[in-house]
Amino acid sequence: MPKRSGRTRSADTVVISPEAVASRLAASRYLADESLATAIFLAIRLGKPLLLEGAPGVGKTEAAKAIAELLGRDLVRLQCYEGIDAAHALYEWNYQRQLLAIRHAGEHEVDIYDDRFLIARPLLQVLKAPEKRVLLVDEIDRSDHEFEALLLEFLSDFQISIPERGTIHAKTQPIVVLTSNRTRELAEALRRRCVYHWITYPDAEREAEIIMLRAGDVANATARAVATAVRDIRARPLAKPPGIAEAVEWANAATILEKGGSPWPEAFRRAIGVLIKDEEDLSYIAPELGRIVEEALA
């Protein structure tokens, strides 16, 4: 079962303005700028899916988690991948339990299409309780065009037809967030269906604020140094540029090493494995890491 975020709240009473959205997201430790807060506000109030695109690590999935927290709802996550099909997204029948029920019933009748034999996948979970759940369709660009078409149909009607049971409709409009790393272009029909927002890496000042908000016992000066160094590192042609989560981890790890006796900037150098997680990127950045960190600490 998905994790309950807290008490369910009415969107009308919580989402009263973009400024209110930004304030409540900050209370959930997610800093949204004006444009993102406005996109979230409009998606919820207009009843449209929210499509968030951006490079890996900019905070798209975390935004969906924060929206669920904002509304006090469960986050139901559908992780997309190449080859994902309807059975993984909609529902499946538990054939083993059905066979066991038939055997145990003997000559008595048994309804093998009862709820107890139905395995609800993310889309059906949200349809059955849209007022309690937020649907996250993560990395939709990793799926194929056939699944994208299925999802578009779902987003158009918010219903699922089960041949043995009939059609299940959402009682209220579900809140849906889609994310994409833009590894391929999405269908124009899907884009038109959504409120769109492109998330970029934050500037150094905002990233320092995020580090301070999400890291443990990290000094302000350390957070600012990390943000400055990470911005410099991301500007280089890396295969896997570090995301915001890695920047937070780097600040935490370097702080732990510094408290254990490693002086700055040695603590940053030794903790580089929590920031850069690709062997070629490590080899590329290693000769300049010392200078990058020293300039950031200056």
Image (cartoon, rainbow, N blue to C red):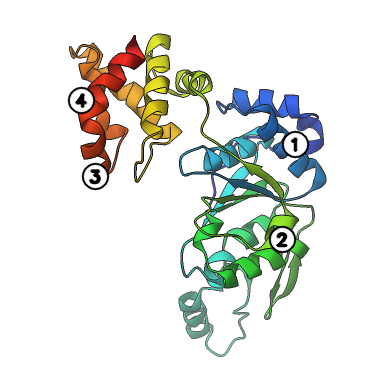
Which residue is the site of mark 1? 41
Task: Pick whichever of labels 4 and 2 is earlier in the sequence.
Answer: 2
Give 10 or 141, whichever is nearer the viewer: 141
Spot occupied by residue 72 in the image (x, y as percentages of width and height)? 65, 36
Among the 4 quarters of the image, the one containing residue 89: bottom right
Q: Are marks 2 and 1 in contact (CB under 8 Å)?
A: no
Q: Are marks 3 and 4 in contact (CB under 8 Å)?
A: no
Which residue corresponds to the image point at 65% horizontal and 41% vertical from the top-left? 73
Residue 189's place in the image compared with 247, above or below, is below
Q: Secondary structure at mark 4?
A: helix
Instruction: Give neighbour class at mark 2: few <14, some 14-19, many 20+ (Cα, 10 Å).
Output: some
Spot occupied by residue 117 in the image (x, y as percentages of width and height)? 56, 72
Which residue is the site of mark 4? 270
Kindly identify the amino acid type of the residue bearing the numbered disc 1. Phe
Which residue is the site of mark 3? 280
Spot occupied by residue 243 in the image (x, y as percentages of width and height)? 42, 36
**Mark 3 against mark 4, which lies toward the viewer?**
3
Among the 4 quarters of the image, the one containing residue 54: top right
Which residue corresponds to the image point at 40% horizontal and 10% vertical from the top-left? 221
Task: Pick whichever of labels 1 and 4 is earlier in the sequence.
Answer: 1
Residue 155, numbered circle: 2
Whole-angstrom CA distance, mark 1 to mark 4, is: 42 Å
Spot occupied by residue 15 in the image (x, y as percentages of width and height)? 77, 33
**Mark 4 against mark 2, which lies toward the viewer?**
4
Q: Are marks 1 and 3 in contact (CB under 8 Å)?
A: no
Whole-angstrom CA distance, mark 2 to mark 1, is: 19 Å
Task: Pick whichever of labels 2 and 1 is earlier in the sequence.
Answer: 1
